[in-house]
Image (cartoon, rainbow, N blue to C red):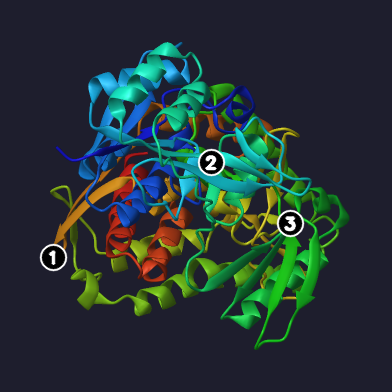
């Protein structure tokens, strides 16, 4: 039998962190548009390609369907641990279930450079003050146990676990009984077990695609792009934002409009985007209604920022033309960028979704764009990319923060709010972030697609709560903007050429949403 490494995630995150992500196991916390356990598995496979992997989870935790499948596909066995056990007791329970466990990785820990050796207590250098076990200490730093251990004498280790209520005491005694225990210091260690260390660890792990570059240094985030004009427009958007919108924005620290080296720097905010909260966390229904209320307030605030500009006919004309460009012309241009050879789908012929015949993507575009251009203009300060990944939620202060605006290239940030509302719609009812996260199954044969999204009842409920709260606060039904939302999904396809499945997922979701819209 092969040795096994255990990802020890047998309890829920502590109360402080539950305020941010809800009651979920440590290895399930969101990190850069994914769950921590995915990164842990990838790292383990890199260092120990032949080892078996088990993960312990609290008994009663309902593992989401998609996560169950990911764990199964990666041959990860789950050990459910009764609640109320100490760490020492839960490890002893795991060893009873699997006698081949010889390595342990704490569930809140990510290690990229696993040290080799049969008997190891891995150390890392820290300058924070938490209740880590300190191996060595100086005024400037501590060397602490970082949450990775390896044991060759499992019979000795298990007896020590049984004899000692503290895992630390058991390991210390193991160190005295077994000669040659190594204490190497590793360089790449991330601790996600405390609120502060969680956000410090998150900030160096980003999920931006190739056309954007994010670099985090200390508490400063620098955003650059191959498209210098795009960055210059974002800088202008921040600089032209009215005073009443400033509380919703991070502080911009530095700007460079040089088209060959365009970038800007903002403060790093220790908060989580709504996209990750929506997909990966277990926030309560009350919390989601509160977030929806904040979104409703934001919608009203953006509209109020346009007061004083609605009487300027030139600005109104510019805003109208810009909206038509975003919702029709730009979508049509994206269709021309579509590579039929890669996906083997003809966008100009009828498609079949799960056996049901539907119009071609081209026909859907023509039908919905004619509706979108006739939509009554809603004058507003325009963010231009008001999707969940660009809205950060500060749970401690009950605030939303906006990042990554799409500047319109005009001298003002004024526009048609319908576009922003469509962007919100594609996050709330279009489930855009679930496709980006891979929470779907897709297969295709020519223009025939089989598609299933992994949406639990809890996810559908939180979507309805957001809709209800926005309507109650702002008087707007997000689901009214299905035509514009579907057009946005069409425009997404060529932008995700790094993932064929994701591109197919967007096409299938266009068809799914078109069906829903027609049934309304």
Separation of disc 1 and disc 3 at Cα? 48 Å
Residue situated in front as seen by the camera: 443 or 115: 115
Q: Is residue 112 visible?
A: yes
Label 2 Cα crowd, 10 Å radius (few <14 / some 14-19 / many 20+):
many
What residue do we see at 80% from left, 52% from top? Answer: 245
The disc, 1 or 3, on the residue closer to the chain's N-terminal end is 3
Going by the image, does 432 lie left or right of 414?
A: left
SS of the residue under disc 2: strand
What residue do we see at 49% from left, 60% from top? Answer: 372
Q: Quadrant of the C terminus?
A: top left
The disc, 2 or 1, on the residue closer to the chain's N-terminal end is 2
Tell me the tag on residue 446: 1
Circle 2 residue: 146
What residue do we see at 36% from left, 48% from top? Answer: 117
Q: Would you identify the image quadrant in which residue 290 lies?
A: top right
Residue situated in front as seen by the camera: 192 or 334: 192
Circle 3 residue: 219
How many numbered circles does the render carry? 3
Which numbered mark, 2 or 1, is in the foreground of this view?
2
Residue situated in front as seen by the camera: 467 or 229: 229
Residue 369 in percent (x, y) is at 44, 64
What residue do we see at 34% from left, 47% from top? Answer: 41
SS of the residue under disc 1: loop
SS of the residue under disc 3: loop
Residue 324 in percent (x, y) is at 55, 69
Q: Would you identify the image quadrant in which residue 502 lies?
A: bottom left
């Amino acid at each position: 039998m092969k040795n096994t490494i255990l990802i020890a995630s047998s309890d829920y995150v502590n109360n402080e962190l539950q305020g941010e992500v809800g009651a979920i196991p440590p290895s399930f916390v969101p990190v850069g548009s994914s769950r921590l356990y995915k990164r842990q598995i990838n790292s383990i496979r890199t260092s120990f390609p032949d080892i078996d992997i088990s993960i312990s989870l609290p008994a009663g935790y309902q593992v989401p369907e998609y996560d169950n499948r990911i764990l199964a596909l990666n041959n990860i066995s789950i050990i459910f641990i009764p609640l109320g056990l100490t760490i020492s007791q839960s490890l002893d329970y795991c060893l009873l279930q699997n006698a081949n466990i010889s390595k342990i990785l704490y569930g809140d820990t990510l290690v990229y450079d696993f040290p080799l050796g049969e008997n190891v207590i891995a150390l890392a250098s820290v300058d924070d003050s938490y209740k880590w076990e300190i191996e060595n200490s100086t005024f400037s730093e501590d060397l602490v146990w970082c949450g990775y251990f390896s044991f060759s004498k499992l019979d000795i280790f298990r007896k020590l676990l049984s004899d000692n209520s503290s895992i630390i005491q058991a390991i210390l005694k193991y160190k005295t009984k077994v000669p040659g225990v190594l204490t190497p210091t590793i360089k790449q260690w991330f601790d996600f077990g405390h609120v502060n260390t969680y956000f410090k660890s998150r900030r160096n792990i980003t999920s931006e695609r190739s056309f954007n570059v994010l670099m985090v240094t200390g508490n400063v985030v620098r955003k650059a792009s191959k498209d210098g004009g795009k960055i210059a427009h974002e800088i202008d958007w921040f600089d032209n934002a009215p005073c009443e919108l400033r509380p919703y924005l991070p502080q911009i620290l530095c700007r460079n409009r040089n088209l060959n080296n365009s970038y800007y720097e903002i403060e790093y905010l220790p908060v989580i985007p709504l996209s990750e909260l929506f997909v990966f966390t277990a926030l309560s229904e009350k919390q989601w209604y509160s977030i929806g209320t904040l979104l409703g307030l934001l919608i009203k605030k953006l509209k109020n920022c346009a007061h004083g500009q609605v009487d300027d006919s030139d600005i109104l004309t510019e805003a109208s033309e810009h909206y038509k460009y975003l919702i029709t012309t730009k979508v049509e241009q994206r269709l021309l960028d579509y590579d039929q050879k890669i996906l083997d789908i003809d966008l100009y012929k009828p498609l079949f979704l799960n056996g049901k015949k539907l119009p071609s993507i081209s026909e859907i575009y023509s039908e919905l764009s004619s509706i979108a251009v006739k939509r009554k203009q809603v004058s507003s300060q325009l963010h231009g990319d008001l999707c969940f990944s660009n809205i950060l939620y500060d749970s401690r202060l009950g605030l939303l923060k906006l990042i990554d605006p799409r500047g319109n290239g005009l001298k003002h940030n004024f526009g048609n709010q319908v576009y922003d509302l469509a962007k919100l719609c594609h996050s709330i009812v279009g489930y855009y972030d679930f496709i980006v996260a891979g929470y779907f199954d897709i297969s295709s044969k020519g223009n025939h697609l089989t598609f299933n999204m992994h949406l639990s009842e809890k996810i559908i409920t939180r979507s309805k709560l957001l809709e209800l709260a926005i309507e109650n606060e702002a008087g707007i039904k997000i689901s009214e903007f299905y035509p514009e939302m579907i057009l946005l999904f069409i425009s997404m396809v060529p932008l995700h050429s790094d993932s064929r499945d994701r591109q197919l997922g967007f096409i299938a979701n266009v068809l799914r949403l078109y069906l829903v819209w027609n049934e309304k």
